[in-house]
Image (tube, rainbow, N blue to C red):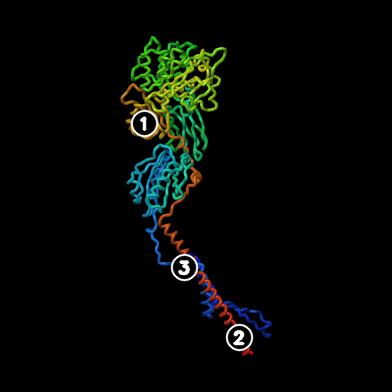
Amino acid sequence: MSVLAWLFGLGVLATAFPFLFHLIRRTPRGQFPFSSLMFLRPSPPRLTRRSRLENLLLLLLRMGAIILIAAAFMRPFLRDNAILNFADLPGRKIAVILDTSASMNRGDLWNQALQRVQRIVGQAGDQDQIAIYRFDSGLTLVRANGPKLPAADFLNKYQLADTEPGWNRSDLGSALVTLADQLESDNDHGDASAKLQIVVISDMQSGSSTTALQNYQWPATVMVDFEQVSPKDPTNATLELLPADEADPGAIRENVLVRNSAVSTTDQFTVAWSGTETMTVPFHVPPGTTRILPVPRQGDSLVSEKLILKGDPASFDNEYFAVPPNQQVVSVAWIGDEPAEDAEQMLYYFQRCLPETATRLVEIAQHTVEKPLEWDVAALPELVVVTRELQGAERDAIDKCLAGGATILVVLNQPGMIESTATWTGIDENARFTTDSGGSYAMLGAIDFKHPVFEPFSGPRFNDFTQIRFWSHLRAEVPDDARVIASFDDESPAIWHRKQSGLPADSPGGIYVMGFGWQPSKSQLALSSKFLPVINRLVELAARTPQVADSGIIGHPVVLPAGYNHVAGPELVTFDLDPEMAVQNQISAPGIYRFSNSTDSTKPEISLALNLDPAESNSDIMPIEQITAFDIPVGKQPDARTEIETQRKLKDLELESRQKLWKWLIVGAAGLLILETWLAGRTDRAGSRHQTALLEDAA
């Protein structure tokens, strides 16, 4: 026999009331007046305890009714012989993902996280299987799915106690999506009845990316539980060097932005370049705000390579690294006889489109008829511009450049060039120039804005070329393998592109042909605002050495020129790059990195400043609604013990609702009350008759 609501059993204590009532003497009910007592003061009998119980049967009936009513409210039922045990239930598959992003370097967050791992492992049941992952910008397996181990040995066995957080950005969304797919896939191929649980141990900072969850249908069988760790002091501020302003290159790099988190308890900070502590600048930044101030440095050049923020207890993001820009060198061979300083010739405008900047240097070498083409195979130009008729030896030299991966730009501005450049342009001797007279002119009628040359002009603000007039241009039929990227309003080709054999189909290199000259006597192109970006775009596409940024973000792709295989990192750490691994995966911490070619000392060293992702400094707590908005079930899967208790309760409810013993108890209580009422009435009548007989005898 078992009950559902045992607490109602306390109602049995109410049986004490009939017992007490039987012990209390009550005032007699019948009154008979005597004339001799009319002048005396009434003195009712005092209530006293009886020395013995009377009417024991009535007492037992009343107490029995109370007991049956209390037992009915307890909802009793008879258990069957079915036994529930842990072996009858499947265990949980628990995947613990441990946040190792840069923000976990704050305070004692990492120690808290390891303690949470131990607690989760210790609380897991014998039927549960546990897997451990680390995540930052990606997901890494630490311990594959398997039976639990003693919590004391878990951290040491998988070397978690010796690990530390990294410096990459946190991408919680991608980690959850990857793990949910993996859990569901493993469940489909294994025990489909297992309960799937993801436990996230993280500081849950709001800078963590959840973009991957936006278009993902979360599986309903996978539940997510968040174990948040928090620092004792939530204060966190970070700094950032603002981008350079080309109009004022001397003062730009001094402009520093300091951002303070909304939950910070401090608003007083200082910023200085390393080695210039005497030039410290105080920053007053209230919580949740930013402030920009100039921070001076020594001299006009960037001698110091690191900005330091002080006053912030969370020091993981209090340094910002910077280096001078890396200058890209592009070599151009100009094959033409025009004077470089003649404002009526094409070279004059071409040179002025390509001034030297901090990030690029274009070296233009002019080759006239008197100066033959003599190029070293190891130093072939990257762009060859042809503006005159060529000799046989010159054509062979240009073919050598094409074979070496150079880009050729043929500018057909005179009839003599048609035959000598036909190998590259693909047009025949029937092509002819048309010179418009009487004020007539041609315009560009169709432009392929999907081609890399004109792609920067694809927006509606920049795609208007109707203001450019052409006084003279070529009319010709282009070969079938050419792609016309611009044509005139008379449908004759203006600019076309031919691929060099051996180059990939999507390569922007090869041969470009212009059927017009850009000098003022033949067109308005050189005087228009479109000329400078078109020429710069051609040079950019022709450059074999990619432009290397001077700064980057830890974990983001790092693009280096071919041959750069040696690295000198912070604290004089040097190593050779593994060609089979991405460069960003071989760099572990923010700092200044210098790349060089170990076999060619003539190649200039490339300096790169890698900083923390600004999103990692956004340490405010991510609201849980940001996760549940993607229909992710948040909570814990029940363990075997909880599941056993739940199933037992359900089984008890089923038995009780089927047996309904409480109804029979109520019927029994009602029967006892009826019997008690009849017996009490009969006893009361017998007592009254006995009292009347005594009075009659006394009279």
- The answer to whether residue 391 is above or below residue 272 is above
> Earlier along the polypeptide chain: callout 3 or callout 2?
3
- The answer to whether residue 614 is above or below residue 515 is below
The residues bearing labels 3 and 2 have C-alpha atoms spaced at a distance of 47 Å
Residue 273 is tagged as none
Q: Secondary structure at mark 3?
A: strand
Residue 570 is tagged as 1
Amino acid type at mark 2? Arg
Q: Is residue 285 visible?
A: yes
The quarter in which the N terminus is drawn is bottom left
Q: Is residue 160 left or right of residue 340?
A: left
Amino acid type at mark 1? Pro
Of residues 234 and 148, the one nearer the viewer is 148
Amino acid type at mark 3? Phe
Q: Residues within 10 Å of mark 1 (few under 14, many from 20)?
A: few
> Earlier along the polypeptide chain: callout 1 or callout 3?
3
Q: Secondary structure at mark 1?
A: helix
Query: Which residue is under mark 2?
Result: 689
The quarter in which the C terminus is drawn is bottom right
Q: Which residue does the image show at 42% across and 49% down from the upper left?
A: 197
Q: Which residue does the image show at 33% across and 28% down from the upper left?
A: 566
Query: Which residue is under mark 3?
Result: 77
The residues bearing labels 2 and 1 have C-alpha atoms spaced at a distance of 115 Å
- Most extreme residue toward the front, as rendered? 430
